[in-house]
Image: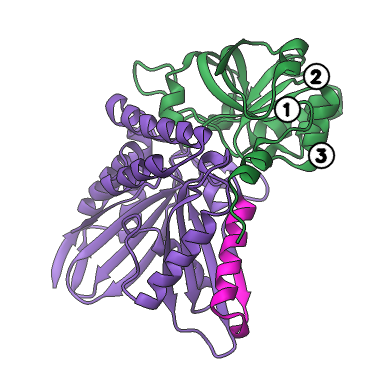
Chain colours: A green, B purple
C-alpha cells in the first residue's frame, strides 16, 4: 500500500516510516547535487547564510536534462547518493529531514539519519522521463552557473519513492537482499 | 579508396546520440519484459514496471530516458581502404556530439580540469573515442552514452593465472555485490578477461555492445557467462536493489590472449537503461 505524504516531512510522519514503505510525495523539494553540496558546506563553515532554509526540508539528488520547449523540466531521475555522503551528516545536523536519491549510504550517514530522526528515500534510477511528469514547477534558486548542478526548488505531485533508510536503522538494501538471497 | 565525407560522420553521430538517449532498442525492452515476468519480489516487479513505463514515456513525449545522458563514448571501426574527406575525423565526431547534446536537449555532463575547477564544457565534448582499423572501405560507428552511476562501479583485477575460472567468477560476483543498488540494476555485466590492464577494460566495455543476452560464440566462454549470471542472480540485490531475483539481465564476456604471468579481469557495469546505437557508412 502506498502512503500519501504531503511535504515538508514532519517528525510524526518520519516516525511512521519503515524501510520498504512505498510513498507518494507532494510538495516542495530542493534539488542539490555534488558541486552545490560542496558550496553549501563551505558556506556553513564560513558562517555565511545558506541559499535556502535547510530545516525540515527534503533534498533531491538530481541534475535534470534541459527542458525541451513547452516542458517544465527535462528528464529528472535520481543520481547516486553515496557521492554526497561526505557532506550529509553536516546537513542533517543543520536540520535536513529527508533525502531522495539512489544507492547505498555510508555508516556515518546512516548513524546521522538515526541520530537526527531523518529518512533516506529511493526513487527509480533511470526513471527520468517518468519522474519528470510528476514535477509541476521548477525554478533555479542559486548557483545557476553550475548548469545541471544548480540548486532548484521544485514542486512535485504524486512523486513515487521507497523508504531505504528509516530513522530506526532499517535498511531496505540489506533487508531486501537477505530475503531473496540464495546461498550456494 | 572510398571517400567518406566528414560531414556525414557528424550527421550520423548526432542522430545516433539523440536516438540512443530517447529510445531503447527492442532487445533491451524484451529483456526487461522477460525480467518482469521472472521477478518474484513485489518491489522488484514494481521497479521493472516503472522502468518499462519510463521507456514508453521517453519515446512518446520526447524526454530523454535518463537525465544522465552520459559521457559520449564512440567506437569506430575504420576500414583501411576508406578515406575521410572534408575534415578531421575526430573533430567531425565531436561536432556531432555537440549538436546532439545542444539541439537534442540532452544533459551536458563533461567537465574540464577534473581534479580542480570542474568547469562544464557546455556541449558534452570531448567524446571518448576508441578507433580500430579493419579491412574494407566502410566506417562503422557505435554510440554509447554511458552514465556515471554505472561507470563508477567499474573494477579491474590483476588476477594471477592460478586463480583460474573460479577466480574470475569470484571477482565478478564480488564486483556486482559491492556495487549493489548504485549502478541501477538490473543491467548488463560486461567482463573482459586477458590482454593487459587497459585492453581488458576496453574488452569489458565492448562486451556491452552486444545485443542483450547474445552469448559469446566460444562455448567455453558462453558457459562461463551462464554460470556468472546464475551466481549474480542468487545475490538477492534485485531491481533497483530493493531485493529480488533479477540483479542482471545478462553477462557478456570478451577474452584476449594474456601474458604467461597475467590474468587481468575487468568488470564494466551497464545500467538497465542500456543505450547504444550504431550505423555503418
**Residue B34: % across, % down:** 35, 45
Q: Mark 1 lies on which chain?
A: A
- Give the residue drawn at x 62%, y 43%: A179
**Residue B64: % across, % down:** 38, 33
Taking B126 as reference, is B265 above or below it? below
Tell me the tag on residue B134: none
Q: Residues within 10 Å of mark 3 (few under 14, many from 20)?
A: few
Image position of B178 (left or right of B246): right
Please tell me whether residue A131 belongs to the stretch shown in magenta: no
- Secondary structure under badge 2? loop
Q: Is the magenta stretch mostly helix, strand or loop?
A: helix
Q: Mark 2 lies on which chain?
A: A
Residue bearing the label numbered 2: A95
**Residue A9: % across, % down:** 69, 13
- Give the residue drawn at x 61%, y 30%: A61
Residue bearing the label numbered 1: A166
> Marks 2 and 3, Cα distance to the nearest angstrom?
16 Å
Q: How crowded is mark 1: few (under 14 residues within 10 Å), some or many (20 or more)?
A: many
Taking A115 as reference, is B25 above or below it? below
What residue span does the magenta drawing correspond to? Answer: B156-179
Name the front one of labels 2 and 1: 1
Please tell me whether residue B171 belongs to the stretch shown in magenta: yes
Tell me the tag on residue A108: 3
Amino acid at each position: 500500500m502506498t502512503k500519501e505524504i504531503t511535504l515538508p516531512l514532519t517528525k510524526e510522519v518520519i516516525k511512521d516510516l519503515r524501510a520498504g514503505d512505498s510513498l507518494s510525495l507532494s510538495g516542495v523539494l530542493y534539488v542539490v547535487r555534488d558541486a552545490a553540496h560542496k558550496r553549501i558546506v563551505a558556506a556553513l563553515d564560513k558562517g555565511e547564510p545558506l541559499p535556502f532554509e535547510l530545516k525540515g526540508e527534503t533534498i533531491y539528488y538530481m541534475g535534470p536534462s534541459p527542458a525541451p520547449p513547452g516542458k517544465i523540466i527535462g528528464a529528472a531521475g535520481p543520481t547516486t547518493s553515496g557521492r554526497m555522503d561526505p557532506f550529509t551528516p553536516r546537513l542533517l545536523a543543520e536540520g535536513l529531514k529527508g533525502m531522495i536519491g539512489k544507492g547505498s549510504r555510508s555508516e556515518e550517514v546512516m548513524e546521522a539519519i538515526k541520530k537526527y530522526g531523518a529518512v533516506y528515500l529511493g526513487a527509480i534510477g533511470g526513471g527520468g522521463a517518468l519522474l519528470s511528469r510528476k514535477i509541476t514547477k521548477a525554478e533555479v534558486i542559486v548557483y545557476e552557473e553550475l548548469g545541471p548542478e544548480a540548486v532548484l526548488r521544485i514542486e512535485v505531485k504524486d512523486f513515487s519513492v521507497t523508504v531505504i533508510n528509516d530513522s530506526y536503522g532499517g535498511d531496505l538494501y540489506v533487508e531486501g537482499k537477505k530475503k531473496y538471497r540464495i546461498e550456494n | 579508396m572510398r571517400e567518406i565525407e566528414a560531414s556525414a560522420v557528424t550527421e550520423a553521430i548526432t542522430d545516433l546520440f539523440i536516438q540512443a538517449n530517447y529510445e531503447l532498442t527492442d532487445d533491451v525492452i524484451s529483456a526487461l519484459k522477460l525480467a518482469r515476468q521472472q521477478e518474484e519480489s513485489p518491489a522488484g516487479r514494481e521497479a521493472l514496471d516503472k522502468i518499462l513505463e519510463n521507456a514508453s514515456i521517453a519515446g512518446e513525449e520526447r524526454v530523454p530516458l535518463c537525465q544522465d545522458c552520459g559521457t559520449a563514448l564512440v567506437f569506430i571501426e575504420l576500414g583501411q581502404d576508406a578515406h575521410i574527406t572534408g575534415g578531421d575525423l575526430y573533430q567531425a565526431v565531436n561536432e556531432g556530439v555537440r549538436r546532439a547534446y545542444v539541439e537534442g536537449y540532452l544533459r551536458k555532463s563533461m567537465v574540464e580540469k577534473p581534479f580542480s575547477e570542474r568547469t562544464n564544457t557546455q556541449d558534452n565534448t570531448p567524446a571518448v573515442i576508441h578507433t580500430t582499423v579493419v579491412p574494407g572501405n566502410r566506417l562503422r560507428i557505435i554510440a554509447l552514452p554511458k552514465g556515471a552511476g554505472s561507470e563508477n562501479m567499474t573494477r579491474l583485477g590483476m588476477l594471477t593465472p592460478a586463480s583460474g575460472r573460479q577466480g574470475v567468477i569470484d571477482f565478478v560476483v564480488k564486483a556486482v555485490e559491492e556495487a549493489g543498488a548504485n549502478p541501477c540494476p538490473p543491467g548488463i555485466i560486461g567482463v573482459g578477461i586477458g590482454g593487459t590492464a587497459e585492453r581488458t577494460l576496453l574488452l569489458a566495455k565492448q562486451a556491452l555492445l552486444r545485443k542483450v543476452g547474445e552469448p559469446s560464440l566460444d562455448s567455453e566462454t558462453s558457459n562461463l557467462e551462464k554460470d556468472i549470471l546464475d551466481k549474480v542472480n542468487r545475490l538477492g540485490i534485485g531491481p533497483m536493489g530493493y531485493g529480488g531475483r533479477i540483479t542482471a539481465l545478462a553477462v557478456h564476456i570478451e577474452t584476449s590472449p594474456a601474458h604467461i604471468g597475467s590474468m587481468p579481469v575487468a568488470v564494466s557495469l551497464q545500467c538497465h537503461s542500456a543505450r547504444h546505437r550504431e550505423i555503418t557508412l
